[in-house]
Amino acid sequence: ENLFLCGIRNSYSKTDPDATMMNTKYDYYNQTGVSKPCYNLQIGVSDGLVMNAGLYQTPGDTKTFIPFMEQFYQLHGYYPKWPIADAGYGSYWNYFYCLEKGMNLGMKYNYYAKKEEPKFKKKIYNMINWKENEKGEKICPQGQVFNQYLYDKREEEGKYLKLTQVYGCKGCGTCPVRKACTQGKRRTISRNPILEEFQQKVDENLRSAEGQEMKKQRSIQAEGTFGVMKQDRLYTRIKRRGKDNAEMEVLKMLIGFNLRKYHLYRLRKQCQA
């Protein structure tokens, strides 16, 4: 019975079996180590209005992107041009999905902002900071070229096949990295050329004038909506139990948010007239 209630999740709450035990931001910053029964709320905002919303049982954001966008398409009949999101959504499968549906790659990947930090650039033994030769091969700080192809790793967990290439070097025995080669054993690195190409396209899109404006609007609109809900409306906890009931409660809250927004727009236009 417990496994049936849990399903594909790794935990559930006894008071609300539909809720998953998650670590909230409060637990993260205060290092309490306490998990709480939660749902993962996703919203899509455009021009200040909530266009789509969904309540999910997975704590991570990565696997919510595709079902969220499919729900958006069912509601509106099209896919957004700029699905701007933070680093929690930037994955190989989500990038492939955007490419298939004609959406621009605008989701940051996990080290998008970190790689430009001076502190991170000092980590010379991180593969991200390694230089490349004219063939695109990685060169470690010890001068070893990772040009020896070893094998491929296949991942078929999602809709899109993922192939990761593993390369090695001759081995110098002097690398100070913990997982590196010692006593002549070679170190290996894993590379996904398609994912690297996707990430380069993300950098190009977000550095453009339109991409920078989209990033700014995401911070204002999406994060601002959560701020209004939590800080101004004091809505910090779902009071109903069960996924359907909790989703109904959240949607009613968001409908009220949209109605208030529309009313303010109407009053502003009347004042301008």
Image: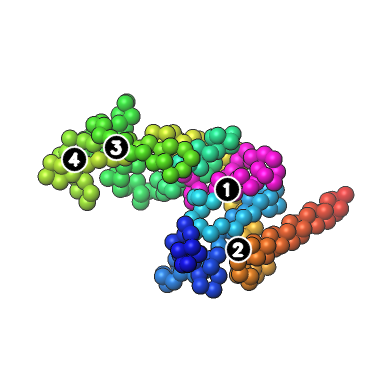
Residue 207 rendering spot, x and y as whole percentages:
52, 38
* Front one among 181 and 56: 56
Secondary structure, mark 3, is strand
Residue 269 rendering spot, x and y as whole percentages:
83, 51
Secondary structure, mark 1, is helix
21 sits left or right of 73 in the view: left
Q: Quadrant of residue 149?
A: top left
- Extreme residue toward the top, this view: 134
Q: Is disc 2 surrounded by few (<14), some (14 to 19) or many (20+) residues within 10 Å?
A: some
* Label 1 sits on residue: 67
- Tell me the CA gap for discs 2 and 1: 16 Å
- Tell me the CA gap for discs 4 and 3: 12 Å
Residue at x 60% of width, y 40% of height: 82
Q: Nearer the viewer, mark 3 or mark 1?
A: 1
Secondary structure, mark 2, is helix
Report if residue 220 is visible in the image: no
The label shown at residue 166 is: 3
Residue 37 rendering spot, x and y as whole percentages:
52, 68
Residue at x 28% of width, y 35% of height: 151
The label shown at residue 186 is: 4
- Tell me the CA gap for discs 4 and 2: 50 Å
Instruction: Please name the amino acid that badge 2 sits on.
Output: Lys
Of the two numbered discs 2 and 3 on the same chain, state the one appearing first in sequence: 3
Residue at x 36% of width, y 49% of height: 120
Q: Is disc 4 surrounded by few (<14), some (14 to 19) or many (20+) residues within 10 Å?
A: some
Q: Which residues are magenta?
A: 65-91
With respect to residue 80, does 53 lie above or below? Answer: below
Instruction: Please name the amino acid that badge 1 sits on.
Output: Pro
Instruction: Please name the amino acid that badge 4 sits on.
Output: Arg
* Front one among 30 and 153: 153
